[in-house]
Amino acid sequence: MTGIRVLIAFAVFLPLAAQSKFAEWNCTAGIPENMSSYINTPGGAAAIITHDASADTPTGRGALKITITKGSLSESDSDVQLSFVHKDGLVKGKKYRVAVTLRAQRSLALPVRLSVIQNTSPWAAVNAPFESYAPNGRYSLPKREWETISLRFTAAGDCAREVRAPCVFLGMLDTGSIIWIESVLLESMD
């Protein structure tokens, strides 16, 4: 009987052991400390990034608010970027997952891309395959409800330095688009 209880306990905790949080950025209380942004103003893009304390979220109130005040002239998704920086690096061959809980002001085919890249020049990709950002290359939000989008990847190389995990590319959004981000998560899948 004792052996059965041990087996059941092992079976119950096995799925929990398979995932572990590396980093979590909660945007409900304010703009996260390790979040940075890049806006290519020479390329025509303009955006305002603030904390919206009144935003209703799945866990309460408060979210990061990104307002595209001018769409990119070059229509490059890298013209507006939000980077959530993980300072401890990643290990080659390990499996990871990044997840972003967000919503849009209006229904739209949301051209958002997630990627994991080094936090220093040459900003090389860490996720493999680099092309696996999202289904069909982009996420879309057909509703104005909160959704969690995610990217599972294997670290392509050891990266002891800081990584943008994830880097959220928003440069394809039109003028007037508003996105709210509640939380961002990086976890190990091994």
Image: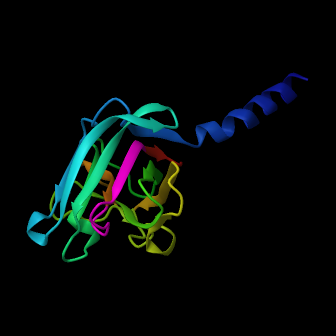
Q: Is residue 178 magenta?
A: yes
Q: Is residue 82 visible?
A: yes
Which residue is at the front of the view, 169 or 117? 169
Image position of 20 (left or right of 157): right
Q: Residue furthest right?
A: 1
Q: Is residue 156 visible?
A: no
Image position of 145 (left or right of 45): right
Q: Residue 182: give x, y in percent of width and height.
A: 41, 41
Which residue is at the front of the view, 105 or 49? 105
Which residue is depicted at the point 25% across and 65% down?
A: 124
- Asked if residue 70 is positioned above or below residue 3 in the image, the reply reads below
Colour mapping: rainbow
Which residue is depicted at the point 25% across and 39% down?
A: 34
Which residue is depicted at the point 35% across and 50% down?
A: 90
Which residue is at the front of the view, 135 or 145? 145
Total marks shown come to 0
Q: Residue 17: give x, y in percent of width and height.
A: 60, 37
Image position of 124 (left or right of 1): left
* Image quarter of residue 54: top left
Image position of 138 (left or right of 73): right
Q: Residue 93: give x, y in percent of width and height.
A: 44, 58
Q: Residue furthest bottom?
A: 74
- Asked if residue 3 is positioned above or below residue 179 in the image, the reply reads above
Q: Quadrant for the N terminus, please.
A: top right
Q: Is residue 97 magenta?
A: no
Which residue is depicted at the point 49% across and 55% down?
A: 149
- Asked if residue 52 is positioned above or below residue 94 in the image, the reply reads above
Q: Residue furthest left?
A: 42
Magenta-drawn segment:
170-184
